[in-house]
Amino acid sequence: MEFSGLRAGAAADLAQVVAAALGVRDDTPAPLPGTGAATPSLPHRLAAVLRDRRTLLVLDNCEHVVDAAAELAGLLLGAAPGLRILATGQEPLGLPGEAVFLVEPLSPEDAVRLFMERAAAAAPGFPRDPGGQDEPDRRAVAEICRRLDGIPLALELAATRVRALGVRELAARLHDRFRVLTSGRRGAPARQQTLRAMIDWSWELLSAPERIVLRRLAAHRDGCDLEAAEAVCAGDGVSREEVPDLVTRLVDRSLVVVADGPTGPRYRLLESVAAYAVERLREMEDLAAVRDRHLRYYRELAERAEPLLRGDGQRAWLTRLDAEAGNLRAALDEAVRRAEAGEPGDAVRLATALAWWWLLRGRLTEARRSLAAVTAASPDDPAYAELGLLHTAFALLTGDHRVAGGTPRAGCGAGDRLAAAGEAVPDPVRRARALWLCAYGLFSAGDADDAEKLNDRTLALFTDARDDWGTAAALGLRATLALVRGDLAGLGRDGGHSARIFR
């Protein structure tokens, strides 16, 4: 029984559809024992008809009439022991004994197979087998299937465009998917004619708070954990305490995907749903507030993680920052835009906090590019001296030894100049850490002499401040420099001491 044609309805309205499919007439005499009804309702007459039969009843597209479908299913199941019901929809009926089977998007292989078959049917001469394509076309097909998340209807809509666009042009235009995927099969329900109509159907079924949370979730990149969802999605119209329940309801409606993450479940939107939700978010007056909450949350996360990357919790925090890489980049992009508008504080704080994660993960080019963007957008202010040192260090680590924007060339007394620049950093430990990274950069650039001088200064600063991590790092670099000179005694002494402190 197909319920998509019903815009709303009570259990009796759904029972009318079921009765018509089963051939149950209005005058069918079938009172249920114990109902006390002289003229039983249609749902009760249905229950009586099914009471002694072994039947599989399929209720299709229940999402927009879920309460009525649950009421009808509960009544029928209670009266007919041999009845089994298969209900399809975006959320469970929530009845006792219900077993939920999640229909996942197609696997990459199955998505490609479906797309190829539908494209071959729509475009004469298009091969059904990927083996009949050249490599660029195979890559384009894989990209189309990935960008459309393996959703069968989206793939079928995309396949109808192959004849006019070809797969490469189609893949290139999916950034504007709602303009591209606009024609379906004649005779299909209206909600299946376009990609936008498909998502509109689900959107219209949501309550106002559910819509608020869904569009705010679109501010994230590559998903988020529940803590981030609470921080970013709460605000006008939704309290922080309501967010977990609303996210759960969106998961039940198949609009949010849940997966295991390093700190628990992570929630993300399929790409097409995310694109739709971003449009809805941009329509609202709270866009700036949502972006502000997103930036503030991920800046605070980075600042909380930064000191913990130098302790026994390093592995766990590296994993957590890795999971949030997309969100951290998005937050930094927003912070740079603000810096360019004259508000550099968030950009400087976030980029400074991320420097050690970039270093430990070997993301040197990303670090240099990001720090350069923040430096360019920030005023030449001594308050941002640490940022300048970090930018210099990553420039050296990535092979840029030129004098550009105040970056010292390796050699030419670079160590002394960097040490002098470090005096503007008031906190001695933060100064020492930035200078140690510069010393490491000078060593990587081949300037062992300046690296050694600057590293010795950082070792003194770390020792005075009783910073064990910094002391071990400076000793480790001194051991490496000893190895380059062939000083095996120094290597053994400083390397062993460094290892003991780190251990």
Image (tube, helix red, strand yellow):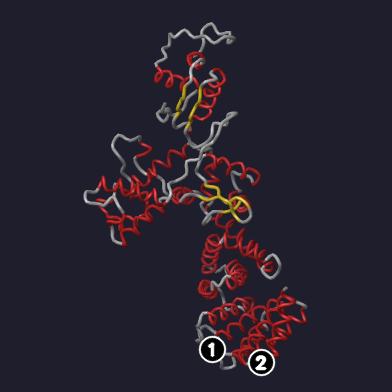
Q: Eyeballing the image, is 10 above or below 365?
A: above
Q: Which residue is mark 1?
A: 409
Q: Quadrant of the C terminus?
A: bottom right
Question: How many other residues sit within 10 Å of disc 2, few (<14), some (14-19) or many (≥20)?
Answer: few
337 or 53, which is in the foreground?
Answer: 53
In the image, residue 196 lies at what x, y percent? 39, 44
Look at the numbered disc 2 and give the secondary structure of its residue: loop
Q: Which residue is mark 2?
A: 487
| Cα distance between the residues tagged 1 and 2 | 27 Å
Quadrant of the rendered image containing residue 318:
bottom right
Q: Quadrant of the N terminus?
A: top left
In the image, residue 272 lies at what x, y percent? 43, 49
Numbered disc total = 2
Q: Earlier in the sequence, mark 1 or mark 2?
A: 1
410 or 50, which is in the foreground?
Answer: 50
Look at the numbered disc 1 and give the secondary structure of its residue: loop
In the image, residue 355 lies at what x, y percent? 60, 72
Q: Eyeballing the image, is 287 above or below 454?
A: above
